[in-house]
Each structure stands twice: as C-alpha cells, then as structure tokens.
Amino acid sequence: MGVLVSSEHAQLQIQEALDAFVRESHAVGIQLCERSGASLAISGDLFRVDPGRFAASLAGLLASAQGVMRPLGREQVESLHIDAGEVKLLSALVKPGFTLVVVFDARSSLGVVRWRLASLVSRLGSLLGANEHQRIGSPITDEEIENLFS
C-alpha cells in the first residue's frame, strides 16, 4: 500500500490544519486519505472508527462513484456528500490521489463545512505538493478492496 513520506514539519502542519478545521467547523472529525486507502492524518472524535478500514472503505466508495460518473464524461469525483440522517459525510478531492473526508452532525451544517473545506483543500494541496515525489509503495488493488468487505 502506498504511503506518503513527508517531513515531520509538513506532517505537523497538516495535523494542525485538520485540528483547526474540526474546531472551527464543529465537525465530528476529518481524515486525510490516499486513493490507495491509506490513512495519512485524522482529527476529531472518530475514535470508534478504525482509520485504516475507514480510509479503505472511502477509497472503494470513491472508486464506485467514479465508475458511475465515467459514462457521463467525468473522470474525477471532486466531492461526494452522503446524508445518513444524524450523521453526514462530505468528501473532497485535495489533489489527484488525496481525499479529505469530513464527518459532521447537527452541530454544523453542509454550508459551513463546504465553506471551511474549500480553504483547507487549498492549504493541504500545497503542503502535499511539496512532498509528492516522496511516495513509496504500491497502490491497493481492487481485489484488496473487495477483501475488506468479505
């Protein structure tokens, strides 16, 4: 599975940005993931969630969404919103290969989360861009994703 290797300083900046986002948007939590399903950073009250499994499930969900959108001429799903009643999820493409997923509830709103997420995506895009050449490992395969659900 591919893992982003970044400087300690860049990792700290990413973590601080996620922590600030959770505070300012009143989100339940946020996670930065690689397309391969690797969890890179997490913040907030997602303690009941296994970060690796959550990231891998998100990778599968986004792959399915891209499969649905491809016949419509869209190669990249930039945002995905799921409303599951009390809990909502919003994913946002930071840059190809990197996705943020925000979990929020009635303490926040979709508008507030989207508004704050736009500036976070920009900031993280620049932080991740500086370390793009330091990726190692191989991406997760479709078979590995399927095995997560069996």
Image (cartoon, helix red, strand yellow):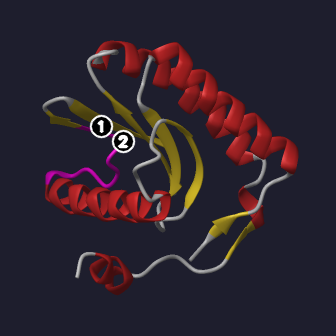
Q: Which residue is mark 1?
A: 89
Write down the quadrant of residue 133 in the picture. Answer: bottom right
Which residue: 71% across, 30% down? 16
The spot of residue 146 in percent (x, y) is: 27, 80
Task: Please tell me whether the stretch drawn in magenta is mainly helix, strand or loop.
Answer: loop
Q: Which residues are magenta?
A: 72-81
Picture coordinates of residue 59, whole percent (x, y): 37, 61
Classify residue 79 by image quadrant.
Answer: top left
Q: Position of residue 137 (x, y in %)?
A: 65, 79
Q: Amino acid at mark 1?
A: Leu
Q: Amino acid at mark 2?
A: Glu
Characterize the local packing of mark 2: few (<14), some (14-19) or many (20 or more) Cα atoms within 10 angstroms. Answer: some
Relative side of 60 to 45, left or right: left
Q: Is residue 113 located in the magenta-colored stretch of the structure?
A: no
Q: Which mark is drawn over residue 78?
A: 2
Q: Residue at x 58, y 80 (%)?
A: 138
Residue 80 magenta-highlighted: yes
Q: Quadrant of residue 27?
A: top left
Q: Is residue 96 visible?
A: no
Q: Residue 136, can we see it? A: yes
Q: Is residue 62 above or below residue 100?
A: below
Marks 2/1 in contact by CB < 8 Å: the verdict is no
Numbered disc 2: secondary structure: loop
Q: Quadrant of the N terminus?
A: bottom right
